[in-house]
Image (spheres, rainbow, N blue to C red):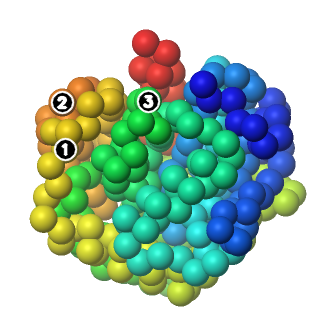
Amino acid sequence: MSSPRNSPSPSTSSYENAPTRSVSVHGEKFAYRELGPEDGVPLILLIHLAGVLDNWDPRVVDGLAARRRIIAFDNRGVGGSSGSTPDTIESMARDAVLFIRALGFDEVDLFGLSMGGFIAQVIVAQEPHLVRKVILAGTGPAGGPGIDKVPALSIQATLKGALTRQDPKLSLFFTESADSQRAGRAFLERLKERTHNRDKDISLPSFRAQLKAIKKWGRQVPSDLSGIRQPVLVANGENDRMVPSQNTRDLAARLPRGELVPLYPDAGHGGIFQCHDEFVPRALEFLES
């Protein structure tokens, strides 16, 4: 039974117009947006490093919300959420569970992207009864090769972006090919579609805390994923330079019910945004099967 007791009914409009709401979690305000049908198991979206509500591709959210109740939220201390940002993935996972319970849900699906995928893995391992199905994109297991390099790559791309006046996501999320770069620019334009009541960018202290958490995750002893019994759909581009794509294959192979979407060709970390036309129907099919 998943209908919450105290959550207002979701907006059935597009993500562009979904109102930003908040719920109190242990005295801190957590900002979130909700849309899609009012019934069914909600799909909780867990965002990437430095991401706020406005970093979700509206094509992905609207596509999923056509048939699923979708809830995106800001991690503690990020965007419109108050408090100080934790510097471990485990603490972020605890916050996400508290947020889900504050909305009154006792069964959810999870969709974790990049850092959000690390958080999703911890939630499903620690709160198995809360989670029905999981989608993991552009992510990898604890201790996965190259994950501890994400902070250095991110800082490098941010500095380079400042010098060239180019959004660092173009080089971090997309490949260098003309097609992928074109898809990247289209994605960045979609992120600007919401013009009112936009979220605040992440603060520097929060960004640093997240970088620290990711570095620790990348250096941890690989976790045992064999206890995760939920169906998990795993997706990525074949040229992910942030969380190297071998992590995606490894994740799918190590999860007892892991299902790998063939890696998107000429796509990187933002593969699900570049290939949203293919990803959304596949994700819906998985959630509904």
Which residue extends farthest bottom?
Answer: 205
Nearer the observer, 23 or 68: 23
Q: Are marks 2 and 1 in contact (CB under 8 Å)?
A: yes
Mark 2: give few (<14), some (14-19) or many (20+) Cα within 10 Å: some
Q: Quadrant of residue 37?
A: top right
In the shown orientation, is residue 93 left or right of residue 214?
right
Per the image, label 3 sits on a secondary structure element best described as: strand
All told, the count of numbered labels is 3
Mark 2 element type: loop
Q: In the picture, which quadrant includes the N terminus?
A: top right
Q: Quadrant of residue 115?
A: bottom left
- Say which amino acid is labelled 3: Arg
Give the residue number, with chain letter if any, for mark 2. Answer: 256
Q: Which SS class for mark 1?
A: loop
C-alpha separation, residue under disc 3 versus residue under disc 1: 16 Å
User: Mark on residue 132?
Assistant: 3
Are discs 2 and 3 less than 8 Å apart at CB? no
- First in residue order: circle 2 vs circle 1: 1
Residue at 20% from the left image edge and 39% from the top image edge: 227
Q: Position of residue 258 (x, y in %)?
A: 24, 30
The residue tagged 1 is 225
Residue displayed at 77% across by 58% down? 22
